[in-house]
Image (cartoon, rainbow, N blue to C red):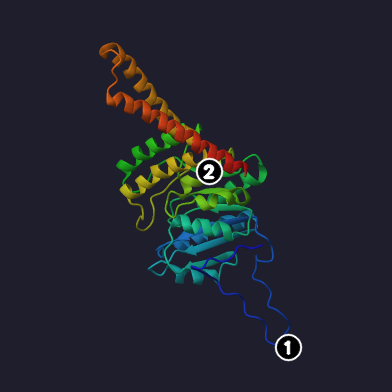
Amino acid sequence: MAPELPADAVASPPAPPAPAGGPGPLPPPVGEDVAPVATIVLPCYNEEAHVLQEIERITAAMDADGMAYELLAVDDASSDGTLAVLRGAEQRYPHLRVVAFRRNGGSGTVRRIGTQMARGEIVVWTDADMTYENERIPELVRVLLEDDSYDQVVGARTTEEGSHKVLRVPAKFVIRKVAEVLARQRIPDLNSGLRAFRKSVSLPYLRLLPPGFSCVTTITLAFLCNQHDVKYVPTAYAKRAGTSKFHFVKDAYRYILQVLRMVMYFEPLRVLMPLALFLFGLGFVKAVTDMFRHAFYFPANTVLLLVSGLLIGSVALLADLVVRSRDSA
């Protein structure tokens, strides 16, 4: 059953029926009579100056490949002329489908709803700001079509051209290393916006997507923590066109919080148990020292360390039990 259109979105109007006594219903637009193999979800928010160029680049690459596809462009309540540009392009590109949100939902909301509306089994996420090598989208899709062992392909960026580069590069490095330790896997690029994945595999995790930029981090960790193989393909990354919507302090905070949240959701012991053992071990060593120094007198801070370690360890075990019960339900 096709997913219902969300209440805050307006899809392209259907073709009008033929007049009474006419030759019959109008034929469907080119491309709609064949189920697409891939659906490319393109979030658009105030991208009026270059979104048409991005559409041309994507459609040229997909048409040259010959793969059946649809390009789902979602206008996230832009305040400029982005929607008008998309509506005009929809008349010229048969594989383009435009959806307009009545209010701004954020990049994660656009990608979640776009994935739910996708008709293709392979879903591609990318951006409309000219940063990613979108001409390589067919290559990413082909990896999944030719190798069933992979459920997601990520375009791993080899350079960083985003805003706040001096602060952003070391912050992303630290957060990525934390994610690698928690997920126990190497992650060349944790939050690349260019990726392709199997829709059927992603559906259970879509409800976990936050509305902002960290949605790409979420889908990466959701796949990795559930033993879905992810392939990383090195890609170039260009300076974005237009104005960046990234806010360093706010989005970096959400970024690290989302990493911890996702690992807690799937593997709480990896986050809580090391802290519990550290506190309990520190309290135990201090208790032994206090016993010899003060003749079995234990200061309040020693007791606090021991009790804190026990409490956090108990919470970790209970959280793990909830996760295991949820997975087996």
* Secondary structure of the residue carrying numbered label 1: loop
Most extreme residue toward the bottom, as rendered? Answer: 21
Q: Secondary structure at mark 2?
A: helix
Query: How far separated are the C-alphas under marks 1 and 2?
Result: 54 Å
Task: Please tell me the numbered disc located at residue 222.
Answer: 2
Closer to the camera in the image, 165 or 202: 202
Q: Residue at x 73, y 81 (%)?
A: 24
- Is residue 243 depicted above or below 159 in this figure? below
Left or right: residue 169 versus residue 299 is right
The x and y percentages for residue 164 are 31, 46
Is residue 285 shown above or below 24? above
Query: x, y (%) of residue 309?
Result: 39, 28
Q: Amino acid at mark 2?
A: Ala
Which of the two residues, 329 or 59, is positioned nearer the viewer here?
329
> Could you tell me which residue is drawn at 37 percent across and 30 percent down?
308
All told, the count of numbered labels is 2
Q: Position of residue 187 (x, y in %)?
A: 48, 36
Amino acid type for the residue under numbered disc 1:
Gly
Seen as rendered, the residue at the extreme front is 296
**Which residue has dot 1 on it?**
21
Confirm whether residue 182 shows in the render. Answer: no
Q: Residue at x 53, y 43 (%)?
A: 222
In this view, the residue in front, 307 or 6, is 307
312 in relation to 252, above or below: above
Q: Residue at x 34, y 15 (%)?
A: 288
Q: Dividing the image into 4 quarters, which one contains the N terminus? A: bottom right
> Local crowd at mark 1 within 10 Å, few (<14), some, or many (≥20)?
few
